[in-house]
Image (tube, grey):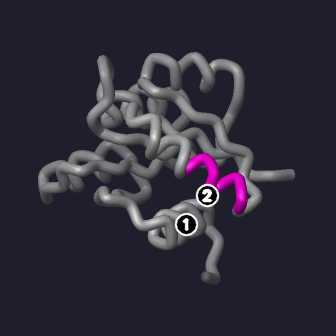
Amino acid sequence: MAEKLLIVEDEDTLCESLKRVFAKEGYEVDIAGSAESAFGLLKEKTYDLIITDIILPGISGIELLTRYKEQNPGQKVVIMTAYASLETAVEAIKAGACDFIVKPLMHDEMKRVVRKALGKSGH
């Protein structure tokens, strides 16, 4: 069965682009434009990996990560941001992110990060 990814990103073009890339790789992909809509999806389904932007309308990606991991400590989450700083990276990792990636995203780099987060090796 295909592994399930949830992409939480408010930039529609990037969201659709990532969805296409990962669907081609054989993943089942859902997208959410905000943390609030992500929480709605997370009530209905479980995901192998959540990929979230930090800057979202309303609740931030870090807050989404923190809240969701309280109930689901084993959930794997990758944080993306265009505003990378050491403090942001440390905050994401402390909150429980398994990886941190800086925009603009390169598809090959994203695929590598997702494979690593899901415990897969290879190219």
Q: Which residue is mark 1?
A: 111
Residue type indicated by callout 1: Lys
Q: Is residue 92 left or right of residue 122?
A: left
Q: Is residue 27 left or right of residue 59?
A: right
What is the span of residues highlighted in magenta in the rendered image? 18-24
Q: Residue at x 59, y 67 (%)?
A: 115
Q: Are marks 1 and 2 in contact (CB under 8 Å)?
A: yes
Above or below residue 102? Residue 63 is: above
In the image, 29 versus 41, the foreground residue is 29
Magenta highlight on residue 97: no
Tell me which secondary structure the magenta stretch mostly adopts: helix
Residue type indicated by callout 2: Val
Specify the quadrant that holds the C terminus. Answer: bottom right
Q: Residue at x 54, y 51 (%)?
A: 18
In the image, 64 versus 19, the foreground residue is 19
Q: Position of residue 53 (x, y in %)?
A: 36, 41
Dividing the picture into quarters, in which one does residue 111 lie?
bottom right
Q: Residue at x 30, y 56 (%)?
A: 103
Q: Which residue is mark 2?
A: 21
